[in-house]
Amino acid sequence: MKPQRILIADDDEKVLALLKSSLQKEGFETNEALNGAAALEIARRELPDLILADVTMPEMDGFDLCKHIREDEATA
């Protein structure tokens, strides 16, 4: 069975590392982004199964990220 892919978007590198480590130990594949704009690019390219997004990030916050994800047919 193919592992599920999770995109983690958070501007705190310690939080990213903790979530990445915990999720990978449970068998998930992860991608990480330090801001919403980078997360959107990764989401469009990788089509993750789940996105964990901080609501307060630079360039694009988690709410705007979710809005853009829903508006794009490929990622909706």
Image: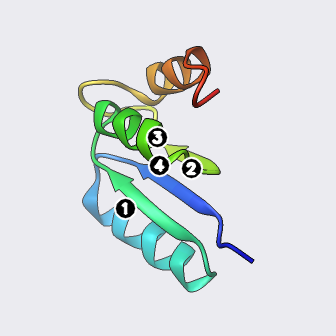
Image-based side of 13 in relation to 72, left or right: left
Q: Nearer the viewer, mark 2 or mark 1?
A: 2
Q: Secondary structure at mark 4?
A: helix
Name the mark on residue 46: 4
**C-beta proximity under 8 Å, tags 2 and 3:** yes
Q: Residue furthest bottom?
A: 25
**Eye-nearest disc, 1 or 3:** 3
Q: Which residue is mark 2?
A: 48
> Residue 60, which numbered label?
none
Mark 4: amino acid: Glu
- In primary-sequence order, the first of circles 2 and 3 is 3
Distance from disc 4 to disc 3, alpha carbons, whole Å, reads 5 Å
Label 3 Cα neighbours within 10 Å, binned few <14 / some 14-19 / many ≥20: many
Image quadrant occupied by the N terminus = bottom right
Res. 43 mark: 3
Location of mark 1 (residue): 16
- Tell me how far mark 2 sits from mark 3, CA to CA: 6 Å
Q: Is residue 54 visible?
A: no
Whether residue 23 is situated above or below residue 68 in the rendered picture = below
Q: CA distance from mark 1 to mark 4?
A: 18 Å
Q: Amino acid at mark 1?
A: Leu
The reply to whether callout 4 and callout 2 are in contact (CB within 8 Å) is yes
Q: Mark 3 is on which residue type?
A: Ala
Amino acid, disc 2: Pro
In front here: 66 or 75? 75
